């Protein structure tokens, strides 16, 4: 994703998502881009009011001429066990993560 696409996604998220704990709106300073590939990104949002946070996986649909933002499983909450499982996986992973994900999704 390029900077322009990330800016569009961040503005979209700010308009569409509120903190699940206190319903506060997110500000640009509350949003961090953790990782991106050509068509996907991982975004972390932390509420400035209550500290509640969300981890999102977002993607660009390249089949559509106007790039459409997709939020996969945005209604599912990520548990602390999910975070620990991912941490343990990444800690022992040795390889190309993007290639691994593409293989898993194929």
Image (tube, helix red, strand yellow):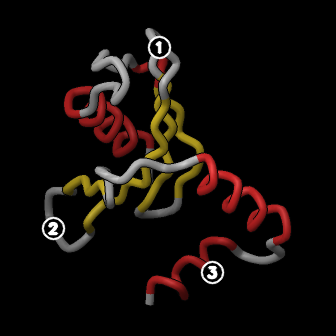
In the rendered view, does 90 fall on the left or right side of 43? right
Q: Marks 3 and 1, how far apart in space? A: 36 Å
Q: Which residue corresponds to the image point at 20% horizontal and 74% vertical from the top-left?
A: 63
Residue at the left extreme?
A: 65
Of residues 78 and 30, the one drawn nearer to the viewer in this rendering: 78
Q: Residue furthest top?
A: 49
Q: Secondary structure at mark 1?
A: loop
- Quadrant where the C terminus is found in the figure: bottom left
Query: Residue 64 bears which disc, if any?
Result: 2
Place of residue 35 in the rendered image (x, y in percent of width and height, measured from the top left): 58, 50
Secondary-structure class at tag 2: loop
Q: How many marks?
A: 3
Of residues 28 and 93, the one nearer the viewer is 93
Label 1 sits on residue: 50
Residue 88, horizontal then vertical, whole percent: 78, 62
Instruction: Find numbered disc 3 in the image and state the secondary structure of the residue it sits on.
Output: helix
Above or below, comparing residue 77 to residue 25 in the picture: below
Q: Earlier in the sequence, mark 2 or mark 3?
A: 2
> Residue beneath label 3, please?
100
Between circles 1 and 2, the one closer to the viewer is 1
Q: What distance separates the C-alpha of mark 2 from that of mark 3?
A: 25 Å
Q: Nearer the viewer, mark 3 or mark 1?
A: 1
């Amino acid at each position: 994703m390029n900077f322009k696409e990330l800016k569009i996604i961040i503005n979209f998220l700010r308009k569409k998502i509120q903190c699940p704990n206190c319903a506060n709106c997110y500000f640009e300073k509350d949003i961090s881009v953790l990782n991106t590939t050509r068509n996907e990104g991982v975004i972390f949002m932390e509420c400035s009011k209550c500290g509640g946070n969300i981890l999102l996986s977002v993607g660009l649909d390249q089949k559509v001429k106007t790039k459409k933002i997709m939020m996969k499983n945005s209604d599912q909450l990520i548990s602390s066990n999910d975070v620990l499982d991912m941490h343990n996986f990444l800690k022992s992973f040795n390889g190309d993560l993007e290639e691994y994900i593409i293989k898993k999704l194929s």
